[in-house]
Image: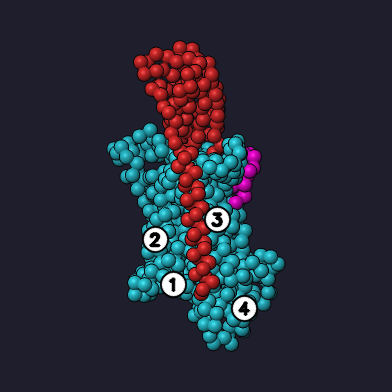
């Protein structure tokens, strides 16, 4: 019984220590980016997304609605179910604040498209857009 | 069943390495400890990590790996998850609390059944769809926490493994699946038990302090895997080393209806029949919820019911799918059996006898569904773990997000079909053997078998249709509402 109690005590202490170590690291890593007053919007072509190739039309504007060109956009599409490989894309040039990005919907269902923008002056922002693929 | 023991089937406890490890008294505790630590990180990431299901340990491990590995273990070995269940360690806290609070009581006789577990399973199936649990790391983590708390609370107040036997929905699923497993914990030599007076396997071993079976399965009278958590307490308690983990013919325990220790006869228990029915038809509903036609059906039902929320629609679908359709199908099949084989017993008794024949196919359906997720997403654990470690301050390298499937996509449907056909084979054999066991004469057994064979073929067709549909990974923006 003594061995069993000691076993549990050591084990619980190890679990607690592991959580604390992981927790401290994650709190630091989870600091949000500085978000500038930048507006991101997403449109999809074709308008009714289907499995296969597509294009994302992303518009980047400032707080006054003026288009922002030459931002770097990192796009990541994730399904809402675990176990699916994400789809990545990138865009660097834009015309009148509009960025056209080739993309592939690999499965039907619900997606979340995350657009992370880095402006030429170093400011960053990101936004998530839900998309349902038939 | 007794005669088969003279063949001395392979006993995993006598195998090198595996046998040595399992026979070690702290083997189970060690496995539980490993899973408990893993569960701690999973809960942690679920609550505080990225809230995207494909990038969070909680959703990836719970809905891809846990489910996939559990059914594979049940198919290939046995009830290994219950053996290593991490919820059992905190249960010891409940026992300690129970002693401090003035002792535990036996589960009241009125609660000694599976109805609570049946209700919890139905609630879980509905909640899974209603709250899109697969899409929410946060909710997934809270379900795990709730599970821990439930196990602690119940085992604080009640003796034995009350949570495992009467409450745990995961355990009931494992019990069902283990009916088709190729291994069983059972007595090696019956004559050794005949001479035994101390009955340590159930009463506990006073010499070593090892407790006996907490699910009230007395080894000499135990038949099959129902209610057996593979905890090995009986193995450790037996002073004559007379209990093994032996190979057996999968599903054979379904063919006859002996009195089973801790359970009685299957055919006298509606609660067990209901549990099997919910788990078999639940397999269909759970898979149906992931394919395209469910979108259409839900839209039509919302229009028909004139509602804007999903809850009433899901309630209707699950009422029909888990209660109405099974009741109609089982009653019609039971009536046909009675008509063809003669009025030997009531339709209710026929249903309680033959419903177990559906178990292999139902389990095959769970296998086919979970295999899809596991085979398409098993390797996602690598980048998700890398991401978790990186976020936690360690350097695990650039997450390899391109990793995912472990088989080519073209293989998926053939694999699923093979699993379903295996299930059908097991079910057809079980149905015929149940008929032989009850009606004795082959031609009458064949008549009794025909309606169940037709039902099984229809269920196989439904399963193949579901698996042939394009899988949709539905989520939080269902129906656009």
B36 w.r.t. B269: above or below: above
Sequence order check: which comes first, mark 4 or mark 2?
2
What range of the chain is rendered magenta? B406-419
Instruction: Give the colour of chain A.
Output: red
Label 3 sits on residue: B70
Q: How is the image coloured?
A: by chain
Q: Nearer the viewer, residue B391 or B69?
A: B391
Sequence order check: which comes first, mark 4 or mark 3?
3
Q: Residue at x 47, y 18 (%)?
A: A121
Question: Whole-Å distance between the Cαs marked 2 and 3?
Answer: 21 Å
4 and 1 marks on the same chain: yes
In this picture, residue A32 sits left or right of residue B5: left
Q: Nearer the viewer, mark 4 or mark 1?
A: 1
The image's mark for residue B242 is 4
Report crowding for label 4: few under 14, some 14 to 19, many 20 or more residues within 10 A (C-alpha).
Answer: some
Local SS, label 3 = helix
Quarter of the figure with residue B234:
bottom right
Residue B373: x, y in percent?
55, 45
The image's mark for residue B345 is none
Local SS, label 1 = loop
The reply to whether callout 4 and callout 3 are in contact (CB within 8 Å) is: no
Question: Whole-Å distance between the Cαs marked 1 and 2?
Answer: 15 Å
Quarter of the figure with residue B163:
bottom left
Q: Residue at x 53, y 67 (%)?
A: A7
* Circle 2 chain: B
The reply to whether callout 1 and callout 2 are in contact (CB within 8 Å) is: no
Q: Nearer the viewer, mark 4 or mark 2?
A: 2
Label 1 sits on residue: B160
4 and 2 marks on the same chain: yes
The image's mark for residue B150 is 2
Instruction: Give the colour of chain B.
Output: cyan
Report crowding for label 2: few under 14, some 14 to 19, many 20 or more residues within 10 A (C-alpha).
Answer: some
């Amino acid at each position: 019984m003594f061995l069993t109690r000691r076993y549990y005590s050591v084990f619980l202490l190890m679990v607690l220590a592991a959580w604390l170590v992981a927790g401290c690291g994650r709190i630091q890593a989870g600091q949000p980016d500085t978000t500038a007053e930048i507006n991101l919007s997403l449109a999809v072509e074709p308008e009714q997304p289907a499995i296969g190739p597509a294009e994302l039309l992303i518009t980047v504007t400032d707080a006054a609605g003026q288009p922002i060109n030459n931002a770097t956009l990192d796009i990541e599409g994730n399904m809402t179910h675990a176990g699916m490989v994400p789809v990545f894309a990138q865009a660097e040039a834009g015309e009148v604040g509009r960025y056209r990005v080739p993309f592939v919907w690999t499965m039907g269902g619900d997606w979340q498209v995350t657009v992370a923008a880095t402006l030429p002056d170093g400011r960053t922002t990101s936004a998530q857009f839900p998309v349902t693929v038939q | 069943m007794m005669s088969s023991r003279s063949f001395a089937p392979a006993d995993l406890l006598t195998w090198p390495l595996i046998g040595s490890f399992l026979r070690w008294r702290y083997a189970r505790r060690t496995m539980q400890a490993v899973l408990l630590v893993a569960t701690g990180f999973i809960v942690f990431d679920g609550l505080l990590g990225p809230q995207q299901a494909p990038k969070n340990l909680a959703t990836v491990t719970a809905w891809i790996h846990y489910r996939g590995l559990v059914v594979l273990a049940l198919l290939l070995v046995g009830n290994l998850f219950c053996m290593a269940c991490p919820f059992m360690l905190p249960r010891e806290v409940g026992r300690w609390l129970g002693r401090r609070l003035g002792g535990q009581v036996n589960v009241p006789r009125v609660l000694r059944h599976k109805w609570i577990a049946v209700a919890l399973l139905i609630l879980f199936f509905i909640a899974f769809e209603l709250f899109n649990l697969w899409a929410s790391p946060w909710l997934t983590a809270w379900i795990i926490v709730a599970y821990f708390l439930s196990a602690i609370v119940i085992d604080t107040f009640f003796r034995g493994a009350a949570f495992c036997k009467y409450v745990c929905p995961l355990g009931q699923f494992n019990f069902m699946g283990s009916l088709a497993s190729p291994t069983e914990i059972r007595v090696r030599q019956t004559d050794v038990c005949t001479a035994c007076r101390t009955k340590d396997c159930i009463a506990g071993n006073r010499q070593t302090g090892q407790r006996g079976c907490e699910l009230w399965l007395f080894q000499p009278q135990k038949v099959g895997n129902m209610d057996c958590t593979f905890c090995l307490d009986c193995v450790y308690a037996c002073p004559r080393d007379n209990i093994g983990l032996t190979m057996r013919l999968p599903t054979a325990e379904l063919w006859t209806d002996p009195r089973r220790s801790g359970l009685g006869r299957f055919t006298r228990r509606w609660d067990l029949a209901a549990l099997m029915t919910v788990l078999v038809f639940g397999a269909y509903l759970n898979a149906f919820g992931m394919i395209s036609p469910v979108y259409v059906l839900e839209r039509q039902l919302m229009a028909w019911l004139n509602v804007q929320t999903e809850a009433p629609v899901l309630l209707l679908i699950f009422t029909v799918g888990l209660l109405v359709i099974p009741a109609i199908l089982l009653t019609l099949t039971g009536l046909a059996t009675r008509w063809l084989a003669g009025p030997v017993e009531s339709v209710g008794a026929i249903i309680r006898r033959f419903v177990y024949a559906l178990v292999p196919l139902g389990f095959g359906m769970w296998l086919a569904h979970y295999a899809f997720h596991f085979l398409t997403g098993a390797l996602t654990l690598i980048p998700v773990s890398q991401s978790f470690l990186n976020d936690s301050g360690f350097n695990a390298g650039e997450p390899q997000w391109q990793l995912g499937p472990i088989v080519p996509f073209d293989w998926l449907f053939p694999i699923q079909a093979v699993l379903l056909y295996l299930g059908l084979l097991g079910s057809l054999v079980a149905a015929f053997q149940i008929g032989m066991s009850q009606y004795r004469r082959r031609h009458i057994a064949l008549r009794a078998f025909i309606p169940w064979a037709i039902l099984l073929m229809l269920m196989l067709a439904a399963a193949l249709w579901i698996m042939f549909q394009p899988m949709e990974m539905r989520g939080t923006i269902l129906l656009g509402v």
